[in-house]
Structure formats: C-alpha cells, structure tokens
Amino acid sequence: MSSIRTLGAATAVLLLASACAGAGGGGGGGTDSVNVLMVNNPQMQDLQKLTADNFTKDTGIKVNFTVLPENDVRDKISQDFSSQAGQYDVATISNYETPMYAKNGWLAPMDDFVAKDSAFDQADILEPIKQSLTAADGKVYAQPFYGESSFLMYRKDIFEAKGVTLPEKPTWQQVAEAAQKVATPEVRGICLRGQPGWGQVMAPLTTVVNTFGGTWFTKDWQAQVNAPEFKEATKFYVDLVRNHGEAGAPQAGFAECLNNMTQGKVAMWYDATVAAGLLEANDSPVKGKLGFTQAPVVKTDSSGWLYTWAFGIQKASKKQENAWKFISWASGKGYEELVGKNLGWSKLPDGKRSSTYQRPEYKQSSGSFSAMAEAAIKSAKPLNPGVQERPAPGIQFVGIPEFTDLGTQVSQQISSAIAGAVSVDEALDNGQGLAEKVAAKYKGQ
Amino acid sequence: MAVMTQARPDTDDRPPPVPRKKVNRWATRAPLLPALIFLIIVTQLPFVATLVISFMKWNSLDPTNRGFAGIDNYVNVFTDPDLRSSVVNTIVLTASVVLISLVLGLGLALLLDKKFAGRGLVRTLLIAPFLVVPVAAALIWKHVLYNPEYGLFNGILNWLGFEAQPDWISSMPMTAVVLSLVWQWTPFMMLILLAGLQSKPVEPVEAATIDGASSFQIFRYLTFPHLRQYLELGGLLGSIYVVQNFDAVFTITSGGLGTANLPYMIYQTFYQAHEYGEASAAGVIVVAGSIIIATFALRTVSSLFKEEKR
C-alpha cells in the first residue's frame, strides 16, 4: 500500500515471472515442499532470507518462494486461485482481498488447523486484524504477517516552542488549529497525501470521511459520494492541505510525506503507523523528537484505518498441512523472536499480536510509538468504521472488487481539487456518477 | 519448394523461364523463412490474443462472470469520458513534445554544424539526456527539479532573490510532463538533423555566398529544403515513441491533474480495474489508430526513399 513501485522493476519482474511460468516454475516440488507467492515488501524479503536455515532445517519442508510487486502479486494470485490451479499453496493477501477471495471459494478455511495448533495461539492475534481476515461465514481464512493502522505524528520540539499542545485523541478541528499555529514559512503545518491512487490519497481521506459521518455507500447500495457529509469531509481535507499542507501536495504520497517529515519540512503527519518506525530509525534526523496521538476524529470514537498482509491457503492445494506449518511458523511468536535476534528488533513484523507489545526488547526499540500503534489497531472497526451500517467490510476502502478502480478514478478528481484545478463539489459530483455505476451492479443482488 | 521437373516438348525451343525463376526465388527466400515465422509468432500472436480477449468479459477479481461479451468492451471504451480526454491528452502531449524537440534540436544541430574547439565533448554532453532511462529521467524531473520543497528550480529562484516558490507540477501539470519529455527527445532530433546537415553538399552554399546571399537566405533556400526529409523522419520516429510514453505520466503526476494519456489509461484499466477485456479493447483501438496515422505519416516520409530531382 505504502510502497513505491517503479514500472521498470515491475516489467522486469513480469518478464521474469513469465519466463518462470514458461519453464513451469513453482508447480510440483517434492511432497515435503510448499510453494509460496509473496509481495516484495521488506518484511517478506527478511522472511525469505530466514526460511531455509530455520523452518526448512527444523521441519524438512522446502519452501519455494515467488516474490513480486504488489500489483503483479494481486494479478497472479487471482489468476492462480480463480482457476484453482494449485500452483501455489500459500499466498500473501491483504484484508482487502481476503473476504472477497473467501466468498469466491478460493481459500481454505483455517479454523481446524488453528484448533489443533495450540502453539500458534490464535487468541493472541489482535481482534480487529482477525476480524478483517474473517469472511462472511464467520471462518478465518488468513493469518496476518504484519498489520498497521493510521495515527498522527507530530514534532514535539516545534509544538513546545510554539506552546501548542495536542490531546491524546484530538479532533480534526483541533489538528487544523494546531496546523495553523505551528506553521512557519520554513515548516508547513501538516503533511497529508494528495497523490492519486486508491491506496494513496484515498486511504487517509476515506478515514476522514468516515469520522465526519460520510460513507461511500449505504447498506442498501445508495452511492453517497456527493452527500453533505462526504463533501464536508473532503472540503475539510482539501482546505487543510491547501492552506497548511506540504508544497507539491497533488504529487505527495507516503514516500514524499516521509521525506518531508524526515527533512523537517512539516510539523505533523497523519499516515500509517509503520511510518513511525522509519522516522525513529537510528539514522533519522528527527529521531526522538516525535510525539504521537490517535487518528483525529469528529463524530466517531476512532478513525484509524486497518491494513494487514496475511497468508492464505489455496483451497485446491494438496499440501495444506505443510502450508499451515509454514504459516504457523511465519505468523507465530517464534518468528518474531528470530527476526529480533537476527536482524534487529525494529525489523519485527509487528501490528498483529498482543504479545509483540509485551516484549521488552521491542519496547526498547520502538517504545515511543508502540503503545499508540497498538491502541490504534485495537480500536479499528473494519466492519463498522463509520456512523452508519456498511454493505461491505473495510475502513479506508470498500471491500468490493470494483473499489480499486473507483477509488483511483475519484482520487484523481480529488488530486485536481487539491491542485485547485476543479472545485470539490465538481470533483465529488463526477465521483458520484462513477459510484452509482458500481452500486447499480449490487442493487439487484 | 518442390523443384519443377517438367518434361519439355522438343518443339519448344524456348527454355521455360517460370519454373527456374521460381526455384531461384525460393532459393533466396528459404533462408529467411525461419526468421519470418519467428517474427510472426512473437509479434502477431500476442496481438491475436489481445483481439480475442477484447471481446470477452474478464475481470480478474470476478472469476464467475467470465465469457463472451460481444462488442460491449468497445462500446464502454468509446463512451468513457476519461478515455476520450486521454485521447486528447495523448495528441497534445505527442504533438507538443515532437514540435518543440524538433525546433530545439534544429537549433542545436545548426550550432554543432560549425567547427569549434571541444565540439565532440559538447555533442556528447548534449546527447546524454537521451541515454537516461526514462523512469529515472522522470524521477529526476519530479524530485530534483520540480519539487517545491527541495527542487533545483525553486532553489535557483531563491538564490536569485525571488520570494516566489511556485508548485510547478500542480500549477502546470501538462507543461511539466511535456518539458521533461522535450529534454529527453531534443538530443534525438538533434542527432537526426545533424546527420542531415553533414550530408549537405558544399558547392551550392559556396556559390550562393559568392552571389552575395545572406546566411539567412542560405538557410531558407538551401539548408531548410535539404533538411525537410530529416525533419519529417525525426517527427515520425519521435511521434511513434512519444505516443507510447508511460514513464513520465506515471511518475510525475500519477495520471492526475488531467495528464493521463492512453497508455496510462490502459494501465489503469488493467491493473486498477482488473478489466482485462476492456483494457484489451482499448489497446486494439490504439493500435488501429496508430496504424492509420502511421500510414499517412509514412506516405509523407516516403519521399526519403525516392531519388530527389533537383
């Protein structure tokens, strides 16, 4: 979600992937093997490094990894899983896909494995994360590898110098006031994403919409994109960015805001909890200068988003036992220990287990924000994120296949509004038309 | 490739020319056949697959709903306002990049046509932008130059004492993309035109100088007509490449602010909407459009391949 993908890399990987597919890679393997298709995020790359010397050594199960960028992984998974070809036993899926894939009958339910595997300790998994990986039939279909929510990061030193304070659970209005008070010509008030994309500007904006009382769709599939609450939230967001936000906002995504915050160009940043670990890294110039609050709210009790990369087992897989052994190891407590001891505690795939936040070494490396991040994830409500009932799960997205496109198209309008090229009203009226098209598909069902 | 062995009637004295010619012709063609077959397999089969998919309902996230769609995808493509605007964007982007690059390239080529110390070095430096990987070039423009916080443009303004720190990409998105592409394509045009200038005959110029023609007249009546074909060639090749440009739009604006061109729209339809059928239909339409335009363009440039009468 918050990863930069360059087309060049994607193309190279695509070529490689097609070459592998041509050579019949991935399929087969011995009985004591398992094929895993993974997204190429850093934590997964760590997992790949640690597998052979630990998991394979202990169990004798060989793991064949295929690692691709996010977009390509989604395509390849949906191709392999939809045909139930069984080429991959395990794949990384996010909480956006899990309920959809489960509904399509592509995933094996995990409840039986969980019941037999007491060491895995399903109760330790944070409740909202578990909920977001549970399908409509109440069964668990994926186990999280790491999870994130969103919260507000701010520069304690700047706030102190200006005599501005923020409560632990600020309202958006308080944040806007603070942004105005701390802003100077050199340091902008706040960084908020403005780059087009369903996973870029649309993610923080949708959480703002939720807490302002808006929604994309009502329970009975009425599109609400140009409803008053949605408009109010979007106007608030766009005005805040235009008045006190970072320069170049229409092109600023996660990476640009991270840059701005690290370089001391902005005093606040509302974004993913994983950003805190990067800002508090040893080589960061702002290390130790940061304060954290819960995601700002208006009408709801909490507004942080929820995102997790998790492992699902393909229903057609003939090696489900081995697949579960691998998942139990990778998502388990032992693996966190392993990463901490071998690669450093800051690299731990966090945000999924309560026990993670009890580890003394972890607390030491990420003490400034870990409690706040845990609270953010625990307070997320993926099934009921707003003030009204929803037709599909999801906080910063709507859990339907059409949302990637709908969100991206609307986000381009919003980005134009941030640039001042169109008005918010115009942008959302256009968005409403797109949303109505999507809603029409579901109304009859 | 059967060798013709016809029994020749004795009454006929003339050797039968056709069979032998046929054999000869096949003798020259045969070694080329594998290459031709390979070419057809690698270039035309994927296109056939695209054609087939463009008539299918195929959303990768909705596997139960897959099948024959008739011309629905094409109807969707033509009725989609975003796609229509992307056609306009593509034309604007291509035309402006090619024309500006040609003018700048012509200027640089004329300068480089003179002999001066260090000409080789200057030429190498001028060609450099064309050798930069497109995605890297787009990143350089987005971050190093345009960025309002740490970009070089605003840094220069600051250094010169100007207060203004404009947000380049947001205030002029299309121009921003065009500029970065002009920077990349000017050297290419310069190279083609320079080759044209180097092949210009010297005598008419000398004669014109003796007759008292000014340097502008020499350019207007001798150099420019000679360069016409090269300008056309540069325009054609440039257009073919810039029409397909994806990197600049993807990197600099992410298709926002009304800069999405056709390749970007197809990417979005394929990757974000997972609409394989619709993306294929859009691709087929682009290919058809390109073929039509290229045919006309080639006809104009075909004068290159003819002997010019002077």
Image: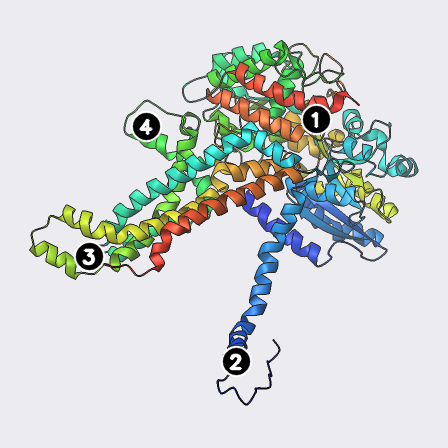
- Which chain is mark 4 on? B
| Rendering coords of residue A404 (x, y %) | 65, 30
Q: Which residue is mark 1?
A: A306
Within 10 Å of the Cα at label 2, are there few (<14), some (14-19), or many (20+) other Cα atoms? Answer: some
Q: CA distance from mark 1 to mark 3?
A: 66 Å
Q: Which residue is mark 4?
A: B158
| Rendering coords of residue A17 (x, y %) | 66, 52
Q: CA distance from mark 4 to mark 1?
A: 42 Å
Q: Residue at x 11, y 55 (%)?
A: B208
Instruction: Give yes or no for contact between labels 3 and 4 (Cβ–Cβ under 8 Å).
Output: no
Q: Is residue A192 visible?
A: no
Q: Which residue is mark 2?
A: B20
Task: Name the front one of labels 3 and 2.
Answer: 2
Quadrant where the image shows the N terminus of chain B: bottom right
Q: Earlier in the sequence, mark 2 or mark 4?
A: 2
Q: Amino acid at mark 4?
A: Asn
Q: Amino acid at mark 3?
A: Lys
